[in-house]
Image (spheres, helix red, strand yellow):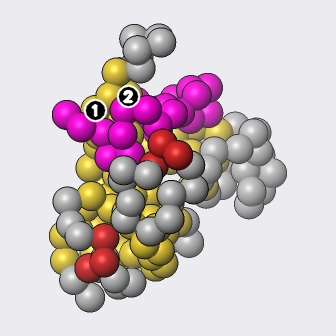
Amino acid sequence: MTRVLGDDWALPALDDQNRAFFTAGVLTLQQCESCQHVQHPPEDVCERCQGFALGSFASAGAGRIESVVVVHHPVHPGLKDHVPYAVVLVSVDDAPGLMVAGNVVGIAPETVAIGDRVQVTFEDVTDSATGTQLKIPQWEIVGSN
């Protein structure tokens, strides 16, 4: 499979906080065990109650595009063959107030619009340096505004 941003584009550096997000194959977000607040990106402390007991929340991965930008000028030489591409902020249906940034795949970038309904999909990649199987979250349009 061809990677969305090319084989030369850096893969995420995994740590205890983001490992599930990039390997589970489910939109896995961080959830406070004390107040149940869901947050992203993951942090060391709950942004609502400042608790330290943090677990995970498996989202259904459905949402709505709240912001979109179509990138036409590569910000890195490794992206010169991959423009244009759409980057979006998605409000996640089952995590009110939370937005996740990502790429939209499977559609011409210029057609992506605020209000479009999206569903998470995953790009399967093997990190050649570690052998880790990654599942990089991406977004697919499932309904127009």
- Circle 2 residues within 10 Å: few <14, some 14–19, many ≥20: many
Q: Residue visible at 24% across and 37% down?
A: 2
Which numbered tag is attached to residue 134?
A: 2
Expressed as whole percent of the image width and height from the top left, the position of residue 51 reads 77, 46
Is 122 rendered above or below residue 130?
A: below
Task: Pick whichever, 46 or 3, lies toward us.
Answer: 3
Expressed as whole percent of the image width and height from the top left, the position of residue 18 reads 56, 35
Q: Secondary structure at mark 2?
A: strand
Expressed as whole percent of the image width and height from the top left, the position of residue 98 reads 54, 66
Q: Residue visible at 33% across and 62% down?
A: 104
Residue furthest to the bottom: 145
The disc labelled 1 sits on which kind of residue? Asp
Q: Residue visible at 38% across and 28% down?
A: 134
Q: Is residue 5 visible?
A: yes
Label 1, on which residue? Answer: 124
The disc labelled 2 sits on which kind of residue? Leu
Residue 93 highlighted magenta (yes or no)? no
Q: Magenta region: which residues?
A: 1-24
Badges 1 and 2: C-beta atoms under 8 Å apart? yes
Question: Magenta stretch: dominant SS?
Answer: loop
Residues under labels 1 and 2: Cα distance? 6 Å
Query: Horizontal placement of 42 versus 101: left or right?
Result: right
Q: Secondary structure at mark 1?
A: strand
